[in-house]
Amino acid sequence: MSKCKFLNRNQVLVNMCLPPVERSGTLWTALAHIITAVIGSGVLSLAWSMSQLGWIAGPLTMSAFASVTLTSALFLCNCYKHPDHNHGPHRNGSYLDAVGAILGKKNAWVCGIIVRINFIKLGIVYTITSAISMRYVDKLMLPSRNVMYVLLRIDFECDRAIQRSNCYHYEGHNSACKYGNTYYMIIFGGVQVIVSQIPDFRNIEWLSVIAATMSFMYSTIGAALGLAKIIENGEIKGSIAGNPASTPASKVWAISQALGDIAFAFPFSVIFLEIMDTLRSNPPEKVTMKKASILAVITTTFFYLCCGGFGYAAFGDSTPGNLLTGFGFYEPYWLIDFANACVVLHLVGGYQVFSQPLFASVEKWFREKYPNSRFVTGDVKQISAFRLNPLSLCFRTAYVAFTTGFSILFPYFNQVVGLAGAINFWPIVVYFPVEMYLAQNHIGRWTKTSVFLRVYCFVTLIVILFAFVGSIKGLITARFS
């Protein structure tokens, strides 16, 4: 009998149905999975978040979100085996499995909706981020003067930020160099419509390898450019209070959006148990995963502090919303071109693989509901790599159209990332892990531990609601200003 589970690598959630295999994972494989799952496009907005919070509140806030993420991981360590968290005998190989087994079907149903919202929000964020970094490579790019242009023309035929960086390089840093995003969102959506029809796209292992490599490369380039800019400036910019605002209210809303951006960058709770399910049993999975979680959170937090801190120290009050395309850096333009190409490669694959689990679940429901419908089960055409099913063709195209349309309507990177971070951080990272921990350990309602954890849930809920409301307000303001 096959075993179906979710496996995430580099913010790429993959729905996989695999035959039972020996679990041979170690501390180092778990550490690698977590780090590559966490570090992604959210890192691009951390310098802006730091600039809104300042040199004291910025690092403290990142450390606080890291602590919440680590707390969630430690709670989830006790949810892998059920009903006894040490001996089982049942294993929960996914987050939804754990919620269903420990908290019941109603909670699993609610959790399932939240997880699907997570898929959709990531599709929207990826569309916006990719559009910012995309632009057709044409003759205006002067391809004969840089081999990189030729390579990008062959591989992508798009990179808006590449054109901007070259415009600044050749026309001067004070040139307008403004290009719209709508056209490139439509291009990105068109690519996704085609790629969506490839069966089993989510099982292509090289996709995760490329995506992981690309995310590390553009994140590292961003941090390195920030450090180089600091050295060039000969000073560390920024202030304790962060960027000044025209009014106290504007400052408050900017802080709330920064909290949402940071919340988007940290969590890995949804894929925690899937990673844990790959570990060997000796030493116990719980012991290995606790060590891996601590090491991963420390490593990721250090990396984020470097990216956010170097960016803020380099640009101070002028820190851009997206470190690579804001446009904070002008030179070396070829390296910025390459970094944005890495962003495009990462997100083109990331969008599709995040969407595949949603496609599979919706289409499965229709097949079970209407097994005799030719629209649901029939084929339009059979081609080697494409299996064009009428339902798949219509639903997947409509889904891509929705995410693309939403992105066109609200093409605002920081506001959308903030909203995406706040919209499901609390239930996934705080509420469900705490409730499962209390239920798994049979902790009474009015015990000290229970009261403390309820207060912890309430405080984090207030913070996330603040970030959510601020991001909504920023999104509406940006849309109608």
Image (spheres, grey):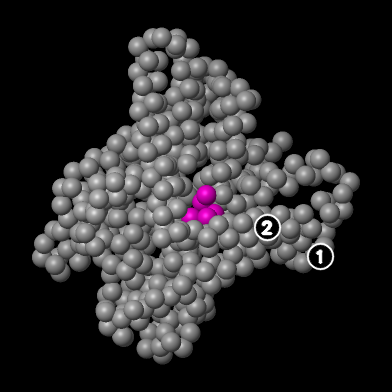
Q: Which residue is mark 1?
A: 381
- Residue 72 lies, in percent from the top left, at 41, 31
Residue 393 position by quadrant: bottom right
- Kindly identify the residue that appears in the image at 15 percent across and 69 percent down: 232
Question: Is residue 169 in view from this perspective?
Answer: no
Q: Is residue 217 left or right of residue 400?
A: left
Q: Which residue is mark 2?
A: 398
**Residue situated in front as seen by the camera: 141 or 38:** 141
Residue at the far right in the pictured view: 372
Q: Secondary structure at mark 2?
A: helix
Q: Is residue 41 magenta?
A: no
In primary-sequence order, the first of circles 1 and 2 is 1
Instruction: Indicate whether 147 appears above or below 236.
Output: below
- Residue 440 lies, in percent from the top left, at 50, 18
**Residue situated in front as seen by the camera: 108 or 84:** 108
Question: Is residue 425 in view from this perspective?
Answer: yes
**Residue situated in front as seen by the camera: 275 or 137:** 137
- Residue 117 lies, in percent from the top left, at 56, 44
The segment highlighted magenta reads 121-125
Q: Is residue 14 left or right of residue 413?
A: right
The C terminus sits in image quarter: bottom left
**Residue situated in front as seen by the camera: 327 or 7:** 327
Spatial separation of the CA atoms under disc 1 and disc 2:
19 Å
Q: Is residue 149 left or right of residue 237?
A: right
Q: Looking at the picture, which amino acid does disc 1 mark?
A: Lys
Question: How many residues crowd mark 2 within 10 Å: few (<14), some (14–19), many (20+)?
Answer: few
- Kindly identify the residue that appears in the image at 40 percent across and 26 percent down: 457
The N terminus sits in image quarter: top right
Q: Looking at the picture, which amino acid does disc 2 mark?
A: Ala
